[in-house]
Image: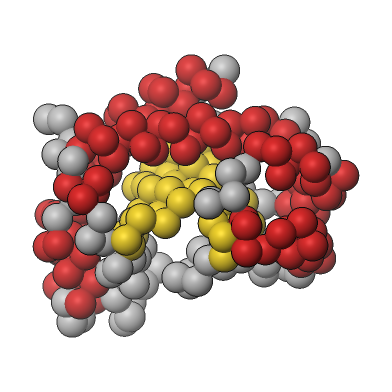
Amino acid sequence: MPFTGFTQSDFDTFHIEGLEARMEAIESRIRPKFREIGEILTNDLSALAGNEMYLHIAKHARRTVNPPKDTWLAIANNKRGYKQHPHFQIGLFDDHVFIWLAFIYELPNKAEIAQTFLKKLKQVQTIVPEDYVISQDHMKKEAFSVQELGKKGLKQTLERFRDVKKAEFLIGRHIESDNPILQNGTEFVALAKETFATLMPLYKLAYNQK
């Protein structure tokens, strides 16, 4: 089935009390949509990256008490997992969708990737549009626009990513839950494709550090 868009019900999932009930809603409401989006984007990203990319959908398997505050799909060039690799993400909190190129703390060579970005800071700034946002922790909603950070803030963010073990670097877009584009599957997928195509040079810069 083609992806038809997100609904308010998808966002309301994260207000359901209890781990089991919320996980059931994630499984029935959101994961089928992730599979639909993922099939399209995995093929697209494989072509852009020049190597095979694989879809992963968050399982939240380690959770035993607290229900997840968000959920996501990830696309990486490794079939077995994504956390130790640069990867692309799409996911939901209760109030927005995120579209990320993600470098999270499990990356074994994150210091080298950060140093590459710092050495090529001007190039990084050229790649990334000013209205994109950056997060330093995939568990939190907060993100800062590239324009707001400026060159100095971007440099400090990358230095923290390099030097702090748990620091992360996620870059992309936030789309508020009431944005009409989310209800149009074709338009949303086109936006995700455009975002990932824009960020692909950054992905390749990082990938060359592997």
Tell me which colouring the rendered structure shows: secondary structure
Identity of the residue drawn at 62% across and 57% down:
147
For the question of whether residue 144 can be seen, the reply is yes
Identity of the residue drawn at 87% across and 44% down:
119
Q: Provide residue 78's location: percent of width, then percent of height.
A: 53, 34
Q: Quadrant of residue 9?
A: bottom left
As displayed, is residue 200 above or below residue 74? above
For the question of whether residue 80 can be seen, the reply is no
Q: Quadrant of the N terminus?
A: top left
Q: Quadrant of residue 62?
A: bottom left
Residue that extends furthest to the right in the rendered view of this protein:
119
Q: Provide residue 55's location: percent of width, then percent of height.
A: 39, 36
Q: Is residue 200 left or right of residue 139?
A: right
Q: Provide residue 48's location: percent of width, then percent of height.
A: 52, 21
Q: Is residue 30 left or right of residue 50?
A: left
Q: Is residue 102 left or right of residue 118?
A: left
Q: Is residue 128 left or right of residue 48?
A: right
Q: Quadrant of residue 86?
A: top right
Which of these two is toward me, 89 or 183? Answer: 183
Which of these two is toward me, 68 or 123? Answer: 123
Identity of the residue drawn at 70% across and 38% down:
126
Which of these two is toward me, 144 or 164? Answer: 144
Identity of the residue drawn at 29% across and 75% down:
67
Figure disc tally: 0
Q: Quadrant of the C terminus?
A: top right
